[in-house]
Amino acid sequence: MAGRNSRHALRAAVLGVLALAAGPAYALGGGGELVIVANQEPQSMQAQVTYKEVNGVGLRNVIEQLTRLDPRTNEVKPMLATRWEQVEPRVWHFELRDGVTFHDGTPFDAEAAAVSINWLWNPENNYSVREMMGPQITAEAVDAATVAVITAEPDPLLPRRIYLGGVTSAKQILEDPASHDVHPIGTGPYVFEEWKQGQYWTATANPDWWGNTAEDPYGEIFFDRLRIVWRPEPIVRAAMVESGEAQVAMFLTKEECGRFDAKDGIKCIVKGSDTFLQFRLDYHGAAPLLADPRFRKAIFTSIDWEGIRLNLMGLGEALQGQMLPSVATGFHDGIRQYPYDPAGARAIVDELKAGGADIPSVHVSTRLGSTPRNGEMVEAMGAMLTSVGIPNTVAVEEPGVFNPRAVSKPTPERAYAWLHVQANPLMDYGATFGAHFSCGGIVSVFCDPDFDARVAEAASMTGKERHEALRALVKEGHDRYVVAPVGLLQRAYGVPEGFAWEFGPDHRIVAVNMRMN
């Protein structure tokens, strides 16, 4: 009861401060400013950040892609490309929309598209979007209105995969690439205005957006301005909608949603997503004992995954011992979540100690604001590891601390685990393996060349053959204790009554799909 009272007191204090600071509310229903309160600040304003909404909330309002996903059917639909065709096993032609210009006034054509694609997927730039790449991607202009996208090996997922890559100004890339990190220049319905780091970023409606006159726009401009602010605490994000300072509060807890739905004037929107929560433990190249399957089994079975999902994660769906749901290509219906067996885990640890093994201390971390209650989850994990004799530390870390280690490879002195969110809009295990089970994966700590070769072979297949090849690899990854899935996230948003928003399982924050009725 004391904890509940303290939360109520904190909420009242937050609302009081916001009421003083917010000033007059924006007039909704006929434009005005749309304010989104996100869970964290963008990592950068690079076009590649659009592949993962959580790392660059709202950036797709400025930067567009060749293709998009329909929010109702999840089918690949036209965006900057109007149609596409696989002309050779490794070559796709994308016909581009006519009359589109970047926000700097330069034309969007095949040359510009090729420059942007080559910059985005370049191995020298090594942007994190490459974790979703599959075979290496390059591009070249065929004519003014057609760009060829070439893959090192056949890639049947390319039209869907290319939806992850933002298309940005070729002039900026060629003449002022440093500004690409902080000042996005795209073709979208909103023109970037200012990024006041640590506080907000803003954009204004684009009167020259191609969607204003096209027959097939993916939305309609309703709001005149867009402002993205960030607050890591769900309680503060919720309070900003309650006070009228924001229209959308991202990633509320189950409890905040229940409170919203019980009050007049505000509501909670909850929807399943393509984003899963995972526990990833250092593997190859790390502290030697982490490559021992017995020790990995001890760690994975010492944690009550289902209890964490139900009692702390709250808004989430069970995953069947793997990172994607049953609709995914490669899903294996014969495996289950790792069992909670603390007695068995303790027995393994005692056996390893008796054999002279030095049990390393495992550092379990999560990123501030990445998902509700992640701090409570790592604390629970730490307590469970301690109970079976595995020393550990736990931390909720700022992005500047968490991110560099998350993308660095292990060293023999390191024993690191993360609890973090990952998305797979492709719903295909080929992408999951490329990101998390490969020697070259940006965030991967697993490296088995033979496994890589079998993944590459499966990735070139289609249909049932692809499904069965990936399915076998899913089972192998599960048996080797590579990653523990926690759950498939449901995302919750607090909004005012009358706020309409159409979005799909990728949960893109796109203002032209929002309006106030």
Image: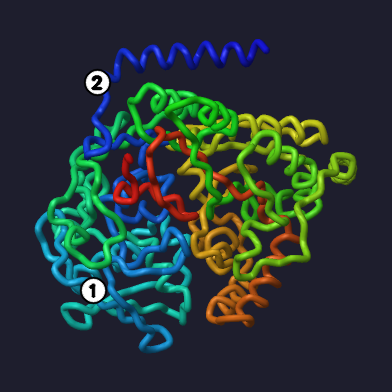
Which secondary structure, mark 1? strand
Amino acid under disc 1: Leu
| Residue linked to disc 2 | 24
Task: Please state the horizontal and vertical placement of residue 131, each as a whole percent of the image.
Answer: 47, 60
In the image: residue 233, left or right of residue 110: right
Vertical order, 177 against 98 (above or below): above
Which residue occupies the foreground of this view, 168 or 503? 503
Marker count (numbered): 2
Q: Residue at x 45, y 68 (%)?
A: 75
Task: Please state the horizontal and vertical placement of residue 465, each as a whole percent of the image.
Answer: 63, 82
Mark 1 is surrounded, within 10 Å at the Cα level, by few (under 14), some (14 to 19) or many (20 or more) other residues, namely many
One can see residue 439 in this view:
no
- The image's mark for residue 96 is 1
Going from the N terminus, do you reach mark 1 or mark 2 first? 2
Vertical order, 138 against 389 (above or below): below
Q: Which corner quadrant of the image does residue 464 belong to?
A: bottom right
Which residue occupies the foreground of this view, 166 or 237? 237
Task: Please state the horizontal and vertical placement of residue 268, each as a whole percent of the image.
Answer: 49, 36
Which secondary structure, mark 2? loop
Q: Residue at x 88, y 44 (%)?
A: 344
